[in-house]
Image (cartoon, helix red, strand yellow):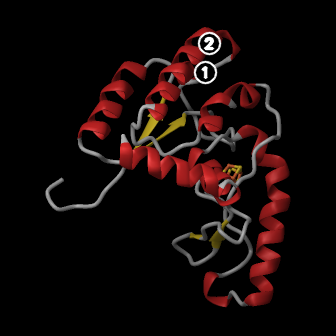
């Protein structure tokens, strides 16, 4: 659109699915990739949040309806980036199972840097690790990843980031990534 390359990221709250449907149709019409993540409560529990927007076990029917709709769209070539399992596994997240692999501590993960130059273990937590980006070397990168992996024991069951989920999923499921690209091109 207008000669720009862009993609959309949508957040799914409890009561905004009708709006998301419009965005999904917009993405299809404009052949633009869209990722859709479930809104989940903040990991740190300190930041205030409006609790009414999050899905819970009471929303099972509504969630199933959303999942069915999204899978149908994915299977008919809509350019939704996230894998089927991200949507389907929301029930496991609601059970607070520790089942998905976060991309941050892997060699494919991203590095986020705070304004003071310290490394953040992730943008959701907005924390600062005791290491400066400019001082990173091969050895400290390994140590940083190890520490990030350790930190996951605390945050992973409380977080369901589609970005962190998708990246790790597609690294380990390249066939699914290829399928997704083919489906988009032929959709
Ligand atoms: S699971 Fe990953 S993305 Fe989520 S809070 Fe932890 S480090 Fe961040």
In this view, the residue in front, 163 or 13, is: 163
Residue for badge 1 = 55
**Picture quadrant of residue 46:** top right
Quadrant of the drawing holding the C terminus: top left
> How far is the residue under mark 2 from the one under mark 1?
6 Å
- Residue found at x 58% / y 18%: 63
Q: Are marks 2 and 1 in contact (CB under 8 Å)?
A: yes
Residue 115 lies, in percent from the top left, at 51, 72
Residue 15: x and y, percent?
45, 17
Kindly identify the residue that appears in the image at 67 percent across and 56 percent down: 168
Asked if the beta carbon under badge 2 is closer than 8 A to the nearest atom of ligand 1, the reply is no
Up the image or down, 124 lies above or below 143; here it is above
- Callout 1 environment at 10 Å: few (<14), some (14 to 19), or many (20+)? many
Q: In this view, does 31 lie to the left or right of 36?
A: left
Q: Is residue 117 above or below residue 100?
A: below
Left or right position of 184 against 48: left
Residue sitting nearer the eye, 24 or 14: 24
Report which residue position mark 2 lands on: 59
User: SS at mark 1?
Assistant: loop
Work out which residue is located at the far front of the displayed protein and give it: 186
Nearer the observer, 20 or 28 = 28
Q: Residue at x 63, y 39 (%)?
A: 42
The total of numbered circles placed on residues is 2
The residue located at (68%, 63%) in the rendering is 121
């Amino acid at each position: 659109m207008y000669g720009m390359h862009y993609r959309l990221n949508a957040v799914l709250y409890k009561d905004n699915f009708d709006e998301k449907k419009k965005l999904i149709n917009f993405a299809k019409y404009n052949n633009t990739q869209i990722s859709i993540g479930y809104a989940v409560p903040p990991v740190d529990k300190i930041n205030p949040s409006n609790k009414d927007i999050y899905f819970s076990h009471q929303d099972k029917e509504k969630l199933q309806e959303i999942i069915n709709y999204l899978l149908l769209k994915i299977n008919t070539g809509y350019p939704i980036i996230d894998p089927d399992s991200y949507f389907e596994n929301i029930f496991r997240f609601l059970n607070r199972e520790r089942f998905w692999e976060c991309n941050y501590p892997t060699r494919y993960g991203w590095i986020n840097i705070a304004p003071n130059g310290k490394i953040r273990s992730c943008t959701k937590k907005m924390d600062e690790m005791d290491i400066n980006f400019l001082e990173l070397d091969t050895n400290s990168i390994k140590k940083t990843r190890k520490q990030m992996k350790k930190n996951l024991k605390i945050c992973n069951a409380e977080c369901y980031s589609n970005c962190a989920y998708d990246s790790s999923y597609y690294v380990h499921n390249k066939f699914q990534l290829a399928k997704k690209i083919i489906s988009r091109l032929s959709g």
